[in-house]
Amino acid sequence: MYDNSIALMRDMSDAGIEYRSDTPLEDDNLIDTIRVGWEGSALPRTTILLRINDRGAHLEATLGTLGAGKRTEALELVNACNANYRWVMFYVDEDGAVVCTSDVYLVPEVAGLFGIAAVGRMFDTMNEVYPRLREVLA
């Protein structure tokens, strides 16, 4: 497991943030995976996957699947969201899932600070945007 993953998990534990690591500590994977779940005032229980390598983390969460005939409306909606949010991006994948992503520079010295901030920013943004997305989700 990468040093930045270990530092992030330590700092999340210290902050009382519940998470689950899919990567054993002694593993030499190319990518470590950590999961953090949360439910907001508008957002149903959602899990962010943090996929971490030695330089950073890619955060990803699926917000739901498109309703029938909603692809065009969904694409317009996620494009509008992407114009309004700088650090978080939304897209519709080929299977019709609405996905939220973010990338963050993550070295051991700042892994907790940057990682926790990125997770918080992503959950806050999804909580804010979800009521608008709900119109296009099944």
Image (cartoon, rainbow, N blue to C red):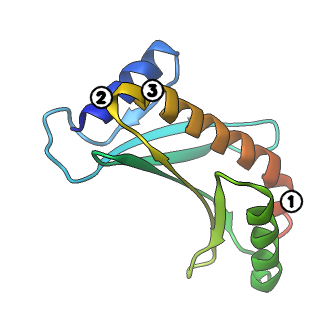
Q: Which circle, 3 or 1, is nearer the viewer?
A: 3
Q: Amino acid at mark 2?
A: Ile
Q: Position of residue 41 (x, y in %)?
A: 81, 36
- Residue shown at 25% from the left, 32% from the top: 3
Mark 3 residue element: helix
Image quarter where the N terminus lies is top left
Using the image as rendered, state which of residue 127 and residue 104 is in the foreground: 104
- Residue shown at 30% from the left, 28% from the top: 6
Q: Position of residue 92 (x, y in %)?
A: 64, 74
Using the image as rendered, state which of residue 49 and residue 122 is in the foreground: 122
What is the number of callouts on the image? 3
Crowding near pointer 2: few (<14 within 10 Å), some, many (20+)? some
Point out the tag, 3 or 1, that comes first from the N-terminus. Answer: 3
80 left or right of 39 in image:
right
Asked which quadrant contains residue 91, the reply is bottom right
Q: Amino acid at mark 3?
A: Gly
Image quarter where the C terminus lies is bottom right
Residue with the mark numbered 3: 112
Mark 2 residue element: helix
Q: Position of residue 29 (x, y in %)?
A: 18, 50
- Res. 132 mark: 1
Marks 3 and 1 sit apart, C-alpha to C-alpha, by: 31 Å
Point out the tag, 1 or 2, that comes first from the N-terminus. Answer: 2
Point out the tag, 3 or 2, that comes first from the N-terminus. Answer: 2
Q: Amino acid at mark 1?
A: Arg
Q: Position of residue 8 (x, y in %)?
A: 39, 29
Marks 1 and 2 sit apart, C-alpha to C-alpha, by: 36 Å
Is residue 26 depicted above or below 103 in this figure? above
- Res. 6 mark: 2
